[in-house]
Image (cartoon, coloured by chain):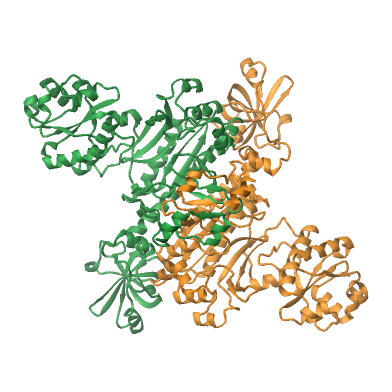
Chain colours: A orange, B green
Amino acid sequence: MRTQYCGHLNKALAGQTVELCGWVNRRRDLGGLIFIDMRDREGIVQVVIDPDMKDVFDVANQLRNEFCIKITGEVRVRPDSQVNKDMATGEVEVLARGLEIINRAEPLPLDFNQNNSEEQRLKHRYLDLRRPEMSDRIKLRAKASSFVRRFLDDNGFLDIETPVLTKATPEGARDYLVPSRVHKGKFYALPQSPQLFKQLLMMSGFDRYYQIVKCFRDEDLRADRQPEFTQIDIETSFMTAVDVRAKMEEMIRNMWQELLDVDLGEFPMMTYEEAMRRFGSDKPDLRNPLELVDVADIVKDVEFKVFSGPANDAKGRVAVIRVPGGAALSRKQIDEYTKYVGIYGAKGLAWMKVNDRAAGLEGVQSPVAKFLNEDVVNAILDRTGAESGDIILFGADSAKVVTEAMGALRLKLGNDLELTDTSKWAPLWVVDWPMFEDDDEGNLHAVHHPFTAPLNMTPEELKANPAGTLSDAYDMVLNGYEVGGGSVRIHNSAMQSAVFDILGIEEAEQQQKFGFLLEALKYGTPPHAGLAFGLDRLVMLLCGTENIRDVIAFPKTTAAACLLTDAPSEANPASLEELALTITAAQKEQNDA
Amino acid sequence: MRTQYCGHLNKALAGQTVELCGWVNRRRDLGGLIFIDMRDREGIVQVVIDPDMKDVFDVANQLRNEFCIKITGEVRVRPDSQVNKDMATGEVEVLARGLEIINRAEPLPLDFNQNNSEEQRLKHRYLDLRRPEMSDRIKLRAKASSFVRRFLDDNGFLDIETPVLTKATPEGARDYLVPSRVHKGKFYALPQSPQLFKQLLMMSGFDRYYQIVKCFRDEDLRADRQPEFTQIDIETSFMTAVDVRAKMEEMIRNMWQELLDVDLGEFPMMTYEEAMRRFGSDKPDLRNPLELVDVADIVKDVEFKVFSGPANDAKGRVAVIRVPGGAALSRKQIDEYTKYVGIYGAKGLAWMKVNDRAAGLEGVQSPVAKFLNEDVVNAILDRTGAESGDIILFGADSAKVVTEAMGALRLKLGNDLELTDTSKWAPLWVVDWPMFEDDDEGNLHAVHHPFTAPLNMTPEELKANPAGTLSDAYDMVLNGYEVGGGSVRIHNSAMQSAVFDILGIEEAEQQQKFGFLLEALKYGTPPHAGLAFGLDRLVMLLCGTENIRDVIAFPKTTAAACLLTDAPSEANPASLEELALTITAAQKEQNDA
């Protein structure tokens, strides 16, 4: 029905007759003429309607915003004085010779010229997606998927689909369950990831697998999580962690180059230990110049117990952040930061303003200075590289609290004081993760998932000292977001059993849940390793938005609801009956109330 | 870890040292040497182990089928006498200089050299997929997806994801329900297709959309259905049905050309009415030369009521199939075909063998000949183009029974008598579908779905005579399989309401189920049309298999179970409690029993 997209018109088409289909973005009546900004997927062009074309003009007079129309007209070059440089098609306009109203529009429930509440936008998502800002994001997402697929296809990866109706796995967060009608009283689970299936595909010899696949997590929702999310899921055989990382780094680097014309450079590599120590985070944002500096050795002999206590405790930590120019912080600001670290369990936030670096103890202003001596203060100032005008902020508590609180404080200071260089891109790999973490009751849990291989270790060595073991896992971090994570997998049944044993999964449970995996490991399983990227996160970063709902065509709210279609909703009682399920009486009462 | 794939070795690499990773496909000990057929994703190559290399030979002596190994060795050209022409790498072999057992294999539960039960194959799917026959299918599927994506990307279609957790729709077959934990007592539904979302995307102005997407149907399973299946889902704006068909035909034609080197030619177009009349099917297999020939007008005055009854009934039909050479059918074979048409409700199968075409009534042999006269017989023989040696088979009953029974008989005869030319490809478009079908109680149901547009009609015209209306729908048929189907959609709220009214969906129900669609139609909806292909079916055809499970990596059984992972399974009682659900007592008792 069209010869061109509105957004593709340019001077080369001057004099030609074109047919356009699209929407009235704006109508203006000016000097007896009608000007229509006409919009389609590719952009906006100005259409001029001359009153001399009476038939066309009469139709144009009926037009309102968002009418769907078809225009036939002649492309003409605008005079220099009327060129609109803010518009991709601003050098031309179309003189209408024919105009057809394809479909009328009632006044919109959204006003495109002002901010609408997110609730309104989600309820009328189909209209919100007409805004070029939104449609550009969805288009960039399509480009990103397409880029990834081409890269992986060209690198010998096979796109293989894995099931959505699967068996429940205990991978941390909760499964969505799907009752079976054929097997009443039994349930499928929606996958949190295709982890086991992709490992089975390696056992089948497919060598390199990928899939861009929906995954599901029924958990309390945070701002950047959705109940369904999309993963770029990858697995390889006979490749080491180094090989996998190199290939994936190449993919992301090429993607940024192609889609944003940005060179991410070579990704630095950092151990988990270093990331936690220097940045208080397993996904450090390296655009932020602040660092945590350990000073336990310096303060371990001071009389101030708040410092020397944790400094002498094997599970304690004393670390400081030097904030350049931070001496200008007001008492009120410092109080707010103190409250902020409180969220993470810190009982206070000692501080030290450096008024005159050369003057040592005399040159600092601090409520705790009186507990410290000249040597201690100078040692801290030296180690942090402090200069006059800076502030030093102290964290002293259990290592866990200090790392979390100071890590969060570092990010907040970086943003508040605009120290984080948001014009930069900061990718890195975080490697050498701990294999297990302790809960408060002395049980070990897998930090990644129970199929992750330990780093260079036999099953016997692993069993001898599980707590301190490192895994051959790696996360890709970009600007402080974990964009991807993966590991070398266990490809040996003795090792897999050892890990299940350490995790306290009993033999019977192992068989019931993972019997097929343990069985599969018996038949010549190749060494394999993989990784999964969060596509939603990658696209968020590509688009420069911090709202994950901006990069999903039909997202759910943080309460896991679709405001457009009103899902979830009540089920047909007949369906429930067929599934042999009933809603508990207590719940029914509550819903009726 | 490798320098090459086994399957890629050839004479050009002669003399080079290669490293290979893969599996022992077969080991033979011959003349003091050990020969290993080593397999990886890309194929098989012969590895020779010389007893002079004692270390390597000792390791090789331990090898058994399906051990995962690494070989370092030298590629050498085989002497002419030892070239294996059945093997892609048959001109070369690798002389091993190093051999590492990466992982051992216990004796396999499947024997690759003989047929295993499908149950065994599904239970050990990861092993079954090692068979080149199976892995080739999965690889061809990946190529097919990749081809489709590239074609659609290059034609301006945007890959946009739609939700998996959606609101239930009444699209015929049953929805899988997913209980919500956040909104207890409420449910999501897994989509039977992204129909409404893709229409909303057109309302958003995305113009051309596609997605290769999982869809779900909780229905009684047939041989070629799976509870989850994959759709190539497509929607366009401002394109007519003709445009859409042309683009999709181009895609499928190019796909066959690229993947099979087959030219499908131009697809013929046939109305639904013609397909049902000539072939007794809405998805005729045109490789089968048999046709249904209507003869009601010829037999309407005969005394034989079995023929003249339906011939004079407006809802009746009398149709014959001429089977070339069918006079050779035995009485027993005819009895079996009679039984076969009985499945479709036919009360009998009259037949007429043409022994001597020139002799008219005298020349035929038939239990019903005595009820017919010379003119009638000659007219039937003329119309069917019968020749000596043929048989004519009669269907006379309600139009529904005759069409179904003779349509099924036509297919069976084509296969049994090898009349269907299975070396050919026969694509076609079936168009001009009826908009509605009658149930036995006089209610109208949508033949496609309730968003399908009628062919050239106003809402008023539609309401005046709904029963006979044709829709602007089209199916793509290939070799008797419906591989894709679609339609022009309703883009006008008056028309959409008219259709809902005709379908007996009351105002309140319309609002509750489709309120968002009716609302969306108010704001300048563009004309739009689309189509969805069944990817599983397309790949079945590409692979030349009739078992849909052969083209899915991890399929479910016809009872919707995964034999590998044992899904569905019992849910954790705590999870059910959290969902505020209980299994009915009756069902629990039954499951415990």
Q: In the figure, is residue B550 to the left or right of A56?
A: left
Q: Is residue B89 something that shows in the picture? A: yes
Asked if A589 appears above or below B574 in the picture, the reply is above
| Residue A224 placement: quadrant | bottom right
| Residue A63 placement: quadrant | top right
**In the rendering, at what x and y percent does residue A554 appear?**
59, 45
Q: In the figure, is residue B275 to the left or right of B193?
A: left
**In the rendering, at what x and y percent does residue A236 appear?**
47, 64
Asked if B359 appears above or below A496 in the picture, the reply is above
| Image label count | 0
Q: Nearer the viewer, residue A441 or B27?
A: A441
**In the rendering, at what x and y percent does residue A521 appear?**
42, 71
At horizontal 24% and vertical 32% (from top left) the residue drawn is B291
Q: Nearer the viewer, residue B128 or A514?
A: A514
Q: Is residue A162 something that shows in the picture? A: no
**In the rendering, at what x and y percent does residue A303 appear?**
86, 82
Q: Nearer the viewer, residue B437 or A196?
A: B437
At horizontal 30% and vertical 79% (from top left) the residue drawn is B50
Q: In the figure, is residue A272 to the left or right of B89?
A: right
Looking at the image, the residue that sits furthest to the right is: A362
| Residue A305 placement: quadrant | bottom right
